[in-house]
Image (spheres, rainbow, N blue to C red):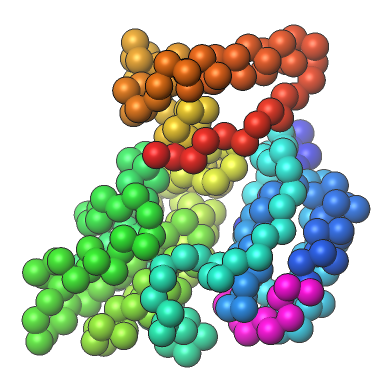
Amino acid sequence: MDAFLTAALYKFVDLPDFVAQREPLQRCCDDNAVKGTLLLAREGVNGTIAGPEAGVRAVLAHLRAMPGLASLTHKESWSSKPPFLRMKVRLKKEIVTLRVPELDPNKTVGQYVKPQDWNALLADPDVVLIDTRNDYEVKIGTFKGAINPDIKTFTELPAWIDAQPALQGAKKPKVAMFCTGGIRCEKSTALMKMKGFDEVYHLEGGILKYLEEVPPEQSTWDGECFVFDERVSVGHGLKPGPYELCRSCRWPLGPEDKASPHFVLGVSCPHCHNQRTPEEKARLAERQRQVELAEARGERHVGAALPNKP
């Protein structure tokens, strides 16, 4: 039985008191055994949380009681194991970092397209379809015909757009953009509007909403959708997929990756085996040993924070 409810959420809204709201929100999460990450900034809230259903709904109620968040929406999925090990409420300059300070998604964004209408939009041959996610996310799945900007962070997207000849010139093409849950597209479509694109569309609710609502036989999605928790990937119906994270570089690993001679559980994979020093590999090997010892005792090893993806 799937006992853990996961709620993904975001909302762009002016939160002038976001600093003062952090501690009460953290306390509410802790009191209700809810884990995950929530980001608070002047521009709004973003995050994913998981835990017992009653606890998650209590946190959602707390959020919606905050000024400006009464209409906050969220996406739900279920899992048999806890997707997160800790709970962190963090203060940020942006709830999704793009570093274009003049951008305000509360004022201008692209046109929302509901999941059931997305396929019809993509059937238009004049539409340029852009995946706004990072390279390691796109690797395991994307929409058929989508352009992969091959970026390592969202902050690289503006420069990539400026470097594309097909997106320059007086006559701007129709552009459709998508991301995991919709939040990146709030900023990326606002960016396109700022750059003079008139017809800009984005998938409402992101890939997750599409996979939740569109039947597999009607889908134009190819592969799995990367998610930022211990599930690693989900497919249609938001069912957990076959991928797992490399505990060294956090790249999603499929069966071929794990069959590679460069894959050492907890230490390296084909994507990072030549990026770690012998000292780092020794430290990771010891960490993996401690994880296995904890599992043998029937415990779950939290350990040190995983290194950032290089």
Which residue sits at x=55%, y=46%?
228
Image quadrant where residue 100 sits = bottom left
Question: Could you tell me residue 216's position as x and y percent?
Answer: 43, 47
- The quadrant of the picture occupied by the N terminus is top right
Do we see residue 115 in this rendering? Answer: no
Residue at the image position 73 percent from the left and 73 percent from the top: 19
Residue 253 within the segment the image draws in magenta: no
Say whether residue 207 is visible: yes
Task: Answer with left or right where residue 305 lies relative to residue 301.
Answer: left
Instruction: Please name the residue shown 38% across and 80% down the image.
Output: 190
Instruction: List the single residue furthest toward the front.
Output: 279
Q: Residue at x 43, y 80 (%)?
A: 101
* On screen, residue 100 above or below 163: below
Q: Nearer the viewer, residue 89 or 242?
A: 89
Quarter placement of the C terminus: top left
**Residue bounds of the magenta highlight:** 9-20
Q: Position of residue 249 (x, y in %)?
A: 45, 32
Camera-side residue: 130 or 76?
A: 130
Give the answer, above or below, for where 131 lies relative to 241. Answer: below
Placement of 25 over or under 271, stated as above or below: below
Locate residue 196, reporting x and y percent. Answer: 24, 87
Q: Quadrant of residue 178?
A: bottom left
x and y, in percent, of residue 150 in the image: 26, 50
Q: Is residue 103 left or right of residue 292?
A: left
Horizontal placement of 198 versus 45: left or right? left
Q: Is residue 174 left or right of residue 68?
A: left
